[in-house]
Image (cartoon, rainbow, N blue to C red):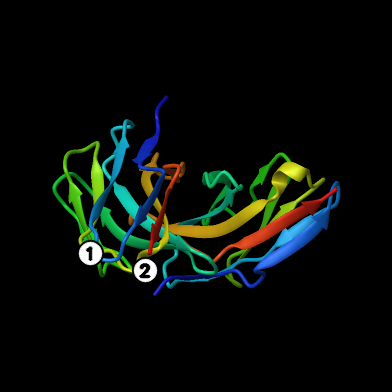
Amino acid sequence: AQTVTQSQPEMSVQEAETVTLSCTYDTSENNYYLFWYKQPPSRQMILVIRQEAYKQQNATENRFSVNFQKAAKSFSLKISDSQLGDTAMYFCAFILYNFNKFYFGSGTKLNVKP
Amino acid sequence: NAGVTQTPKFQVLKTGQSMTLQCAQDMNHNSMYWYRQDPGMGLRLIYYSASEGTTDKGEVPNGYNVSRLNKREFSLRLESAAPSQTSVYFCATVTGAPPNYGYTFGSGTRLTVV
């Protein structure tokens, strides 16, 4: 069975500081993709960053980067220079290659304080 | 604009009433999905359709039925609504192919069953 665990239900960070959101997952498959999605109060789901499991290099997208540890099945999201607009729910997810079905964690609510 | 359109955005039902949530995508994708989002539980897959004419159960299918009317449309029906079905419902479609996988989500339907 595939599972995704986000152990931090809620986190806070001061504006301009750095915060790391944790995610672990479990799968016996070797080929998969990992994602972080952001859901602001508007409810819209927005892709933040994507990582291919076969790549050792950690993905980065501007202020967002991941720490992907495949052996440990860990996929954390680091947000640098936090902004008020980063306030949202963040979901970790993965999809098995060619299975077209996502598995989501329960989410971490991030509050960026001015 | 290309995307996933869900209707309605909000709905209040009485216990025992029925309704259909509509979803349409204009990206010519094969796969479509229905999720429900509950606090502390992330997104859980209700049903999915890998292609026109096929549907499969996800993690929480009880109390729901689906119809893949054509390639564009995938509807979710509640035959006899129950308070436990109070949730936010998302329709999604898979974007791209490896390595550019991603989900495109609709804007969600907030359903309250009283």
- Quadrant in the rendering for residue B55: bottom left
Where does label 1 land, which residue? Answer: B80
Measuring from the top left, give residue A11's x and y in whole percent: 73, 63
Q: Is residue B12 visible?
A: yes
- Of the residues shown, which amino acid type is indicated by label 1? Ser
Picture layout, residue B114 above or below residue A111: below
- Outermost residue on the left side: it is B53
- Of the residues shown, which amino acid type is indicated by label 2? Pro
Provide the chain ID for the residue under circle 1. Answer: B
Residue drawn at x 55%, y 43% is: A46
Measuring from the top left, give residue A80's x and y in whole percent: 79, 48
B114 or B96, nearer to the observer? B114
Dot 2 lies on which element?
A: helix
Measuring from the top left, give residue B101's x and y in whole percent: 44, 45
Residue drawn at x 38%, y 37% is: B4
Q: Is residue A102 visible?
A: no
Number of marks in the rendered image: 2
- Quadrant in the rendering for residue B70: top left
Residue drawn at x 57%, y 43% is: A42
Inter-mark Cα distance, 1 to 2 = 10 Å
B50 or A59, nearer to the observer? B50
Where does label 2 land, which residue? Answer: B83
> Could you tell whether B41 is left or right of A13 in the image?
left
Residue drawn at x 13%, y 47% is: B53
